[in-house]
Image (spheres, helix red, strand yellow):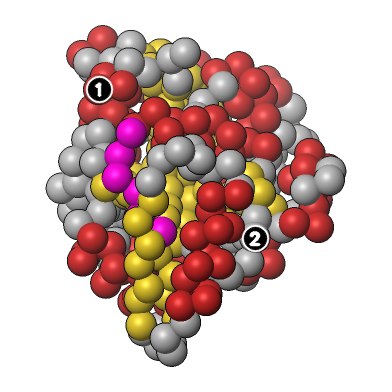
Amino acid sequence: MAFSLLVLAGFYPPEQRAVRYADELASALGGRLVLLHAHRASLFDPYVFAGDTWRQQELAQDADTAALLRQLAGQLQAPATVELVTDLLPDLLPALAQRYAPALFVLGLPAAGQLSSGQVSIAALELLRAAHFPVLLVPEHTAAAVPPQRVLIAADRDPFALAPHSQPAADLLRQLGSEQTVVHVSPVEDDAGCACALRAVQHSGLVDAGHYQDLRGCLHPDPASGLLAAATEAEADWLVLLARSRSYLGELFHRSVTAAVASRSTSPVLLLPVIEPAATTEPAAAAQATLSE
């Protein structure tokens, strides 16, 4: 069954890079693209008081943008459609997911030193993480193979289950047929922790039971630096990070391990929402009630 990738599209380098990468991936695997353009991404609708007339007027002014994006869609290798919205809002994300059933949302990361909370891609990432959607982040200088040949899955001792929206992303990972390595980073040697990490990944449904996963321990005092070192050593084309609710800290590019890895990685980073074992009995309710990493 063909998959779709929903890509935040625009005319600046991060968005253009994301579109190119997503096009290569979709064309290689027989998927399709949705080019999503938004003026803003926010928690609140700016037209809630002004009325929908103002929204329609703003959309009407996007005729040139829409024409250029449709022209771009026609030049891509994979089949592509265009979706224009004025504002990417929390209640719009489920509607987009239902309409297009994307395996992943794809975002281009701004260059190091150019991160700003006002950028649409950064705000969109916060919304997607909070809504528990899987996101593929494409960094500035990526030379990873497309489709990825080697995937590094970062895991710790704790068991997990896939969040509801993560299942299509897991299906896509299996479709890749790539070499899979599970890495466990710790400040001291911890073979038992490595074994627990591998078991957690295998029992989660993220990987095929019959597909071999390599296991690698990484000795490093800093989790982010350790993961990046392991990715370099393994020559990983993708780095998969489990987005756990308990480790979400709110400031994306300042305090979390995910932030540090995403901002420094030279390979695409897949943020995959997962839920804790206590929440697996009611995954749908848990996904609505918790925030992602």
Where is residue 60? Give x, y as percent: 50, 16
Please rate how many residues cluster around mark 2, counting C-alpha atoms within 10 Å: few if below 14, some from 14 to 19, many from 20: some
- Identified by mark 2, the residue type is Pro
Left or right position of 236 against 163:
left
Pointer 2 residue: 159
Q: Nearer the viewer, residue 66 or 149?
A: 149
Rendered location of residue 111, percent (x, y): 26, 58
Residue at the far front: name it.
Answer: 210
Residue type at the position of mark 1: Ala
Tell me the number on the disc at residue 28: 1
Badge 1 density bin: few <14, some 14–19, many ≥20, Cα 10 Å: some
Residue 146 magenta-highlighted: no
Give the Cα distance between marks 2 and 1. 33 Å
Q: Kindly report which numbered mark, 2 or 1, lies closer to the viewer in this rendering.
A: 2
Tell me the chief SS of the magenta region: strand
Residue at (54%, 30%) from the top-left corner? 168
Q: Residue at x 68, y 37 (%)?
A: 164
Q: Locate residue 62: give its quadrant.
A: top left
Contact (Cβ within 8 Å) of mark 2 with mark 1: no
Query: 119 above or below 66?
Result: below
Q: Which mark is residue 217?
A: none
Residue at the image position 47 percent from the left and 71 percent from the top? 194
| Residue 91 visible from this viewpoint | yes
Q: Which residues are magenta?
A: 177-182
Dividing the picture into quadrants, the one containing residue 293 is bottom right
